[in-house]
Amino acid sequence: MRIALFSSQNYEVPFFKQAIEPFSALEFCFINESLNPNTVALCQGYDAICVFVNDIVNADVIATLKEYNIKTIALRCAGFNNVDIKAATASNIDVVRVPAYSPEAVAEHCIALMLTLSRKTHKAYNRVREDNFDLNGLLGFNIYNKTVGVVGCGKIGQALVSILNGFGANVLVYDPNIGEGPYTLVSLDILLAQSDIISLHCPLNEHTYHIIDDAAFAKMKPGVMLINTSRGALLDSKACISALKSKQLGYLGLDVYEQESELFFKNHSEEIIQDDIFSRLVSFPNVLVTGHQGFFTKEALKQIATVTCENLNAARVGKPLLNKVE
Ligand code: NAI
């Protein structure tokens, strides 16, 4: 089975080379380009494709994949909002994914964002390197006894809840699909109104697009901290800018961004960023952005490569696809 792996990065290649060892019939071609309607021609001659979060697998791309007789799309991530599942099903193309690859990696990254924003360790690091030991401007707050709202409590949300309980936080959860647990289940409105910190862990779909908009900010406590490590379009970025300017939003930690496909996973340091909304966001002193690195631990990369190879091999030999997206 020949597989075109798009958006390939140097750091993941060794993990795939190791994971492929038990599967001699699989053969990866690592392609740096991302997949989109302009690059889909690169898929010709392959049996399957392997894509990541910012590859665009829309109906047009899928129509071409069908023409090329490609039978499997293997997502090497959990989210699948970038794939038109209906179009793939209609074209008889299976879509498989890696449903969990260290949810703890993302949950721990959330905590890194929360603590950095609160305790300003990024600023302290720079100050101390210049022999500046002044504490003015570095005042933080405890997570202990704070109310933290978790929107979406699946694998990552649950891992975060465990950590937050360890901190001694009062954890509220809004998730329409789960039952009792080590948290207080509340409506979204109550979560927004009562939380000192809000962290988003629901998938992006038609119900959750811009779940945090101007109206949601108006319901929050003034000075609230908001963390998004899920998908960029859960947040209305313009509403974030207004809320930051009015100080309704006191801290913003992002690992994802609505228009991240233009920016993330590449070095743009020699260019002029054309996205004014992004540039405005990163200009605030109380905003911390990381470039979709929540998943980026050795443990998670190993799991991604292993499960992706297992998914592709199952498709090759016609075994049941345990990680198929329906
Ligand atoms: P999951 O499927 O285990 O959990 C999602 C939870 O959200 C479920 O419990 C579901 O009931 C809930 N949910 C669905 N609709 C909701 C709504 N309208 N409001 C509130 N909750 C809702 O997914 P998992 O593994 O926890 O991942 C969550 C998201 O994290 C993924 O969709 C993905 O977008 C993102 N992610 C980000 C990564 C990163 O590197 N930053 C890495 C992996 C995932």
Image (cartoon, rainbow, N blue to C red):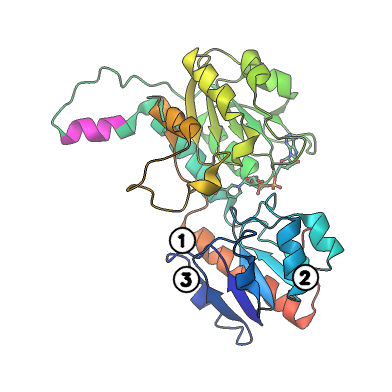
Query: Is 13 in front, or is 160?
Result: 13
- Horizontal arrangement in the rendering, residue 115 relative to residue 150 (left or right): left
Q: Which residues are magenta?
A: 123-129
Q: Quadrant of ligand 1?
A: top right
Marks 1, 2: nearer the viewer = 2
Crowding at dot 3, Cα within 10 Å, few <14 / some 14-19 / many 20+, comes out as some
Q: Quick check: marks 1 and 2 in contact, CB under 8 Å?
A: no
- Horizontal arrangement in the rendering, residue 58 relative to residue 20 (left or right): right
Marks 3, 2: nearer the viewer = 2
**Which amino acid type is shown beneath numbered disc 1?**
Lys
> Mark 2 highlights which residue?
66
- Horizontal arrangement in the rendering, residue 176 relative to residue 32 (left or right): right
- Horizontal arrangement in the rendering, residue 93 relative to residue 132 (left or right): right
The CA span between labels 3 and 2 is 27 Å
Element under disc 1: helix
Task: Check if residue 211 falls in the magenta segment.
Answer: no
Indicate the quadrant where residue 147 lies: top right
x and y percentages locating residue 50 in the rendered image: 62, 67
Q: Is mark 2 within 8 Å of ligand 1?
A: no
Kindly identify the residue that appears in the image at 54 percent across and 18 percent down.
243
| Upstream in sequence: badge 3 or badge 2 | 3
**Which amino acid type is shown beneath numbered disc 2?**
Lys
- As drawn, 95 above or below 259: below
Residue 258 marker: none
> Mark 3 highlights which residue?
13
Kindly identify the residue that appears in the image at 32 percent across and 48 percent down.
270
Asked whether residue 110 is in view, the answer is yes
| Upstream in sequence: badge 1 or badge 2 | 2
